[in-house]
């Protein structure tokens, strides 16, 4: 197998995104295929955080809300994300977590569609998305119900005149399967339903065109392909046509038209600001900003081209080098229908992944039987793909995964 490593080196040699890797902190020897779960740290974050803590917080204290631009962070950071998702600069804010933002946009959507009680989604959606619908339905007390489809192809058939909202994750977290955003949004609108897109596994991984698809609402994560850091705040998109009429229930003072008027009654901002709730997490946003700044210099279309190449190379190598060891591709084979990850099923997926991690090839496990490998084109090289498959092949051949220490489950898998 070693002879063919030259091909990977050659691909890296002519990779237009190759130089970005050096901007991230990745310890030598580590092959990090889990940036779809938690992206690595951009090297400038250390210095930026130090300045924020020492100068802005310790020294300037409250003045920094104005002088260091803290107050504007939710919209300023949102404007940096906007071009990656086909949104206008004033149509995205960074705030709260994806789960909380889902609550806000779902609540706004059901209020815009009174009388309809069905929320369509997929059984294989990321569980928090479904849990938030359950919580909201119970809280709203108006008899809203989830209608879950079992295969992605069934979504459009499930949309009829009873449907208030279609809530989907654009790229499935387990399989990486991509929905046709424009087509589903169009069909939902034809039936009078609103659409909420979760872009957790899309943003920074492939181009998204929310405005082009005429999407109503979207939410997404910044700690995955956007490398914002653990627990980095999420974002919300609201179509411009809905910003003055969509009402979200977490009506905190940052969503008020004049937060510093200290008016005793709530008057929502006439802008995307109405989707804010309370004081922004300045330290987390400070870590996120340099990670977003890199996108000024990166073309998301080039990211997609390399992502497809990396994933195709990985699938081809695994099928060549690991044939006969019980691996089954769980992601679509057609790259047009696949995000920036590749998943394989295996009877002993958990133990095999633990053995890989012990050898510094980091992917993750998703119950019950999936090994998930994320390929973030800003810092993953073709040689990483090659070396990862060589390691996987070695583990399967030697059955090293049978070791007792690889069978123990941690809280976070
Ligand atoms: C990662 C992810 C989330 C995470 O939600 P948090 O509120 O940040 O924990 C939500 N939805 C999807 C589809 C995800 O992939």
Image: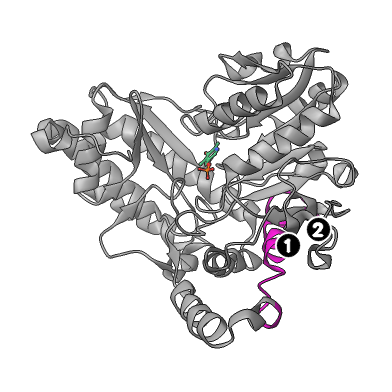
Residue 353: x and y in percent read 26, 37
Would you place residue 157 above or below residue 28 in this image?
above
CB of mark 2 within 8 Å of CB of mark 1?
yes
Residue named by callout 2: 90
In magenta stretch: residue 396: no
Residue named by callout 1: 75
Q: Quadrant of the N terminus?
A: top left
Would you place residue 293 above or below residue 407 in this image?
below
Q: Seen in the image, is 270 located left or right of residue 2?
A: right
Residue 178: x and y in percent read 60, 32
Q: Seen in the image, is 185 located left or right of residue 80?
A: right
Query: What residue do we see at 54% from left, 31% from top?
Result: 172
Residue 62: x and y in percent read 63, 80
Q: Which class describes the residues within 10 Å of circle 1: few (<14), some (14-19), or many (20+)?
A: many
- Name the residue nearer the viewer: 255 or 229: 255
Label drawn at residue 57: none
Disc 1 element: helix
Q: Which residues are magenta?
A: 66-91
Q: Seen in the image, is 388 located left or right of residue 129?
A: left
């Amino acid at each position: 197998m070693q002879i063919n490593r030259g091909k990977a080196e050659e691909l890296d040699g002519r990779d237009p995104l190759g130089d970005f890797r050096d901007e991230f902190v990745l310890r030598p020897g580590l092959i990090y295929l889990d940036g779809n779960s938690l992206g690595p740290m951009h090297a400038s974050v250390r210095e930026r955080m130090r300045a924020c803590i020492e100068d802005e917080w310790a020294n300037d204290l409250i003045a920094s809300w104005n002088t260091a631009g803290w107050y504007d962070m939710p919209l300023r950071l949102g404007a940096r994300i906007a071009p990656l998702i086909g949104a206008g600069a004033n149509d995205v804010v960074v705030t709260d977590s994806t789960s909380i933002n889902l609550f806000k946009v779902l609540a706004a959507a059901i209020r815009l569609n009174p009388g309809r009680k069905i929320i369509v989604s997929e059984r294989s959606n990321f569980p928090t998305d479904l849990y938030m619908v359950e919580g909201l339905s119970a809280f709203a007390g108006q008899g809203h119900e989830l209608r879950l489809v079992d295969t992605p192809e069934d979504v459009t058939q499930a949309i009829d005149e009873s449907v208030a909202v279609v809530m989907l994750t654009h790229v499935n977290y387990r399989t990486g399967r991509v929905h046709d955003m424009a087509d589903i949004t169009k069909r939902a609108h034809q039936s009078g339903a609103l659409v909420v897109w979760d872009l957790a596994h899309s943003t920074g991984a492939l181009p998204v065109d929310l405005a082009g698809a005429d999407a109503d609402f979207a939410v997404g994560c910044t700690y995955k392909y956007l490398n914002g850091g653990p627990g980095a705040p999420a974002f919300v998109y609201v179509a411009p046509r809905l910003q003055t009429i969509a009402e979200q229930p977490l009506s905190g003072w940052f969503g008020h038209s004049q937060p510093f008027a200290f008016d005793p009654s709530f008057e929502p901002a006439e802008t995307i600001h109405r989707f804010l709730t309370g004081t922004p997490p300045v330290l987390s946003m400070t870590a996120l900003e340099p990670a977003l700044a890199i996108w000024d210099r990166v073309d998301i279309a080039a990211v997609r081209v390399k992502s497809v190449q990396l994933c195709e190379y990985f699938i081809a190598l695994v099928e060549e080098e690991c044939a006969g060891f019980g691996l089954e591709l769980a992601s679509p084979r057609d790259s047009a229908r696949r995000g920036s990850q590749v998943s394989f099923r295996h009877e002993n997926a958990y133990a095999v992944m633990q053995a890989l991690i012990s050898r510094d090839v980091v992917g993750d496990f998703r119950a019950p039987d999936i090994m998930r490998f994320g390929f973030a084109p800003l810092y993953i090289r073709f040689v990483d793909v090659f070396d990862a498959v060589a390691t996987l092949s070695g583990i399967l051949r030697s059955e090293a995964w049978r070791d007792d220490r690889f069978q123990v489950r941690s809280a976070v898998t």
